[in-house]
Amino acid sequence: MSAVTTSSAAPKARNPGIPAQARLLYATAFIVPMIGLAVFFLYPLGLIVLRSFTQRDGSLGVGNYADVLAMGHIGRVLGNSLVMSGLTTLICVVLGFAIAYALQRTKLPFQWLISVALILPLLAPSLVQALGLIFLFGRNGVINQFTGWNLQIYGLWGLVISNAMYALPQAVMIIQASLRHSDVRQYDAAMVMGASPWRRFVDITLPNARFGLLSAGFVCFTVTITDFGNAAVIGGNYRVLATEIYAQVVGQMNFNMGAVIGIFLLIPTLLAFYIEKVAAQRQSGGGSESAIPVGRNLLAARDIPLGLVSHLTALFLIAVVATVVFASFVSLWPYRMDLTLRNYNITTQGGYAPLWTSLVVSVQTAVIGVVMLFALVVAQRRLSRGAAKVVYLLAIVPVGVPGLVLGLSYVLSFNVANSVLGMLYGTTLLIALCNFYHYHSQGFLTMVTGIRTVPPALEETVTCMGGSALHGLRDAILPVMLPTLVAVFFFLFMRSMVTLSAVIFLITPRLSVGAVSVLRLDQAGFTTQAAAFSVCIMAVVLSALALMKLALWLVSRRPAAHVTA
Amino acid sequence: MHLEIRNLSKFFGQFQALANVDLEVGSDEFVCLLGPSGCGKTTLLRIIAGLEPFDRGTLELGGRDLAGLSAQHRGFGIVFQSYSLFPHMTVAENIGYGLRIRKAARAEIAAKVGQLMELVHLPEYAQRYPHQLSGGQQQRVAIARALATDPALLLLDEPLSALDARVRAELRTEIREVQRRLGIPTIMVTHDQEEALTMADKVVCMNAGTIEQIGTPHEVYSRPRTRFVADFVGISNLLEPARVAALDPGVARSQPAGGAHLLALRPEDILVNPDPAGEGRVDAVTYLGNINRIALNWRGLELVAETHRGLSLGSGALEPGARVSVAVAPQAGVWVLA
């Protein structure tokens, strides 16, 4: 509790202090999310480390590591993962920069088309890209069928393409943000000093985007090295860590070996996470509050190739998702292309029940997430600088933990008999909590950005006028934070609808979610039904997206959208 | 009521933000805390408001110890530089906020709000939102809001610093009028010496966490006690005792005993006249509209003088290098602690 005061060196009598009610409020706002992080993130993660050192006879040691390393293929699997993610990251960063630049700095026509294309991969579970690729280029894909070629899409290249499609929108978003914050005056100054367009690009644009590029690379590497959906559907014989861990745990019930591979998965991610943090600290400064954004212009030599690359990529993304949608209405791909609704009559794998479960889970994730994250940032504002930094670090560590590792750690922690924690296993609540902590960091960072827009003087005004801490929350913080809360709510909802890698471990015969259904239907050979189910998920997420736009529009029309100071 | 601060000190870690501050604010006094940024003036205001704890000393209002009382329960009014109006509330709702928190009757709130809006000359803006008002209007609303609960003390934290020069001048007079009419003891923080001199009953000059001088605007300008005050409130020529001999014997009274002193001479007390045979040489002239500021060298002293245009220079502009005769006004000069 002593951490929840405004200053550390405050002796007894001279400190007017915080009234008891406020103290209680801030303490609750601090302690509840912290307990959440401890029980649903740190404890499971600790357990996975412990289990990786627990040998078959129950003693502690590095036996599991030795066993895993002794497995002949593990080196190859690790290498495969690194090669696959490395290639994907390279493609995403290069393409992402080109597209972000086109969207942010050029007058290229039909930019809306690129923007729409980039939303598509966010609407569906990652394996939908793989599904679409298979419909197009697979053994029974339209291309092979109608040309008589023998394209091999299964394996490294299929995996790289589908993962690149999945990660590209995130790369573009990050790089675009870094381009947006440049100041036109830097360019004007350089031009006045005689720098050519190319020099300006090399001396200003690239250095300013450096951090964005690094961040994008980090995100692409992390999400693809741990992605399970695409690897399971299109990986074929090209085995990667994500499929290996699943095989060890679900196939052979070898939890300790799974834990070891989980640790292996953590290493590259945490390394990338650390490098990015260090780089982020160097990047400070530069951009000023009053930066004047750089305008757009038209430059044929630059824009024709740029437009070609951007639009072809966009068309490819659209084509793949459109193929999935189309395939969902086809009776037998690619042999009988007559249209039918039969695929939507899904009775196997629990029918549509998992879709409703997903909906329930996603609402729970969003509600829990918004409440916990809001409480955490409100409490964090009161902490001393050091304590706030610790909370910040703890809150963003989850981004470095792959979904698969988190999911496995949940099985180890909560699939236990005779325990309070065990009672959660098999409930939607546990899946919701898993999803929340999976996306904790992104939600937290959005909240932190949001609460920074609340002027501290506004809260102090409430206090000086005799308002309690609750008044401050209601009248100073909430009205300004509302758009942020809406954004975080829908972010968590949409991610929770489509995520696969963590929840794959948490489903039970009685409780499954939509993304898993798509995987199971595909693995059972009902590919068009898998497509139909994906379309249903996309419809739900698309509706959520529309609702969010509506909510944000309504929120932006309120007077509180104009914060002075 | 009467605010009394005794021997108050405040530390931020190892850094001492305030050192042994003593200050009294009378029951209807307007006090300005004046000093450069980082001098501790805002910290002192925040301690008085209860927004910041302090480490040593006492803080009493009307004989009642404030140390154990939280900001929420002190019943003071506060106005920040950034207006800090509630963006989602209308002007009337903003002003009535403190009363609503106190669960006052609806009719009572309406009456008080109407009265205050008259007071700050905004009666027709009741249903507007803050973003529909100009900066000056928003700050008026903030002042009305602070006054609504009949505060025992009004605290103003650089309330005019974000405003245009013209609006600032208008509001100076308005704030002072309202304060006189209501008779509320008021403390205002500012770094603008002109603001402090025009508004305050009492100016508190602060530097590096200590109070250098407390006095009426006239006192701090004409009889600065320290080198800092002489230099921060207006500008001064600060002369070492050894150099004072260069002045005419009538000007330099004997140096007071105890501690090192400097002689502070206001630029307007140095009279400059163009004179080809004069002992002074002009180094630079800064044109300030109504006055000229002249840097000159005279009997080995570097001095700054100010003259009203046309008064002593005739029609001919004074150029650098020109010879001038220099005289120091009788009775000019104050000895200040170095």
Image: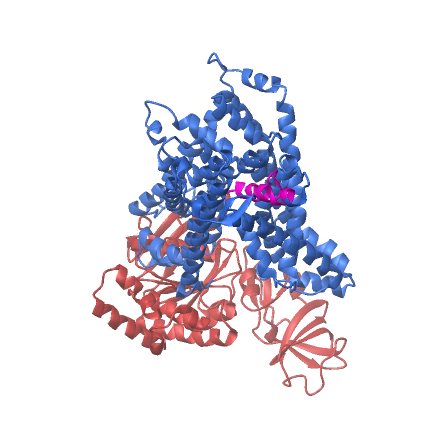
Residue at 71%, 71% in the rendered image: B298
In the figure, residue A380 lies in which quadrant?
top left
Is there any visible trace of residue B157 in the rendered image?
Answer: no
Please give the count of numbered marks on the rendered protein: 0
**Does the segment drawn in magenta span residue A267?**
no
The percent coordinates of residue A221 (x first, y second) are: 61, 39
**What shade does chain B have?**
red
Q: Nearer the viewer, residue B238 or A402?
A: A402
**Does the segment drawn in magenta span residue A126?**
yes
Residue at 54%, 43% in the rendered image: A333
Q: Nearer the viewer, residue A515 or A544?
A: A515
In the figure, residue A42 lies in which quadrant?
top left
In the figure, residue B297 lies in which quadrant?
bottom right
- Image height check: is A415 above or below A152? above
Locate residue B244 relative to residue B120 in the image: left or right. right
**What shade does chain A have?**
blue
Is there any visible trace of residue A407 in the rendered image?
Answer: yes
**Residue farthest toward the bottom in the current orientation of the protein:** B315
Give the main secondary structure, helix, strand or loop, of the magenta stretch: helix
The percent coordinates of residue A74 (x first, y second) are: 61, 23
Q: Which residues are magenta?
A: A125-145
The percent coordinates of residue A117 (x first, y second) are: 57, 54
**Residue farthest toward the top in the current orientation of the protein:** A57
Locate residue A365 relative to residue B252 in the image: left or right. left
- Image height check: is A481 above or below A389? below
Q: Nearer the viewer, residue A383 or A135?
A: A135
Q: Quadrant of the N terminus of chain A?
A: top left
The colour mode here is by chain
Residue at 64%, 86% in the rendered image: B310
The percent coordinates of residue B240 (x first, y second) are: 64, 61
